[in-house]
Amino acid sequence: MKSQTLGFSASVCPTVGVGGHFSGGGYGMMSRSFGIAADNIIDARLIDVNGRIVDRKSMGEDLFWTIRGGGGASFGVIIAWNIKLLQVPETVIVFTINKTLEQNAMKIVHWWQYVSGKVDEKLLLRINFGRANCSQAGSGRETVQASFTTLYLGRVETLLP
């Protein structure tokens, strides 16, 4: 089924794949609004140590809790996940702003730390640090770059105020 308004609290680290994402807990860009991926897993099928295929009911809540954050490979082979899809707006806003130390990145980081927990739950503000070429022409130096990635579940008209 294809939908413009159903989503999932997906990963910010796509290289781990679905199994790694789910069994590792699953922090994603919509986690602030909908919780982590593990919070939205309804059921799973797992081959246990005795070779039995078990589901949530037959594996028990302790094991079901464990495979959603404790690393699925440690407790059996997970062969299926049943997830709850989330109702999201048809329009979402995603953008990244990169700033180097020379572009006052640390002032923005300070501001980000102050406001990030106080904004609307539909807005996720994420920050990553990395290396970048210095913005001073011809310097050949590297500097620190802060990348501010944002996801807003809604239209720009409701984001700006």
Image: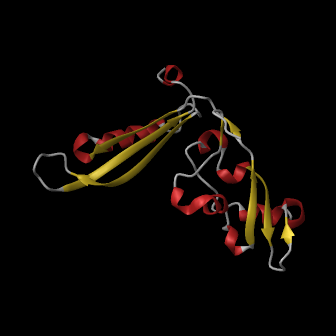
Which residue is depicted at the point 85% across and 62% down? 55
Which residue is depicted at the point 26% across and 47% down? 101
The residue positioned farthest toward the left in the image shown = 138
> Position of 155 compared to 81: left or right?
left
Picture quadrant of residue 108: top left
> Position of 36 compared to 82: left or right?
left
Which residue is depicted at the point 34% across and 47% down? 146
Work out whether residue 149 or residue 45 is closer to the camera in this orientation and state it. 45
Picture quadrant of residue 78: bottom right
The residue positioned farthest toward the bottom in the image shown = 50
Which residue is depicted at the point 71% across and 50% down? 39
Query: In this rendering, is residue 59 above or below 39?
Result: below
- How far from the left and from the top, in percent, is residue 59? 85, 66
- How far from the left and from the top, in percent, is residue 144? 28, 53
Work out whether residue 97 or residue 81 is closer to the camera in this orientation and state it. 81
> Position of 100 compared to 17: left or right?
left
- How far from the left and from the top, in percent, is residue 112? 42, 39
Query: In this rendering, is residue 133 above or below 155?
Result: below
Number of marks present in the image shown: 0
Colour scheme shown? secondary structure
Picture quadrant of residue 47: bottom right
The residue positioned farthest toward the front in the image shown = 1
Q: Quadrant of the N terminus?
A: top right
- How far from the left and from the top, in percent, is residue 160? 47, 22
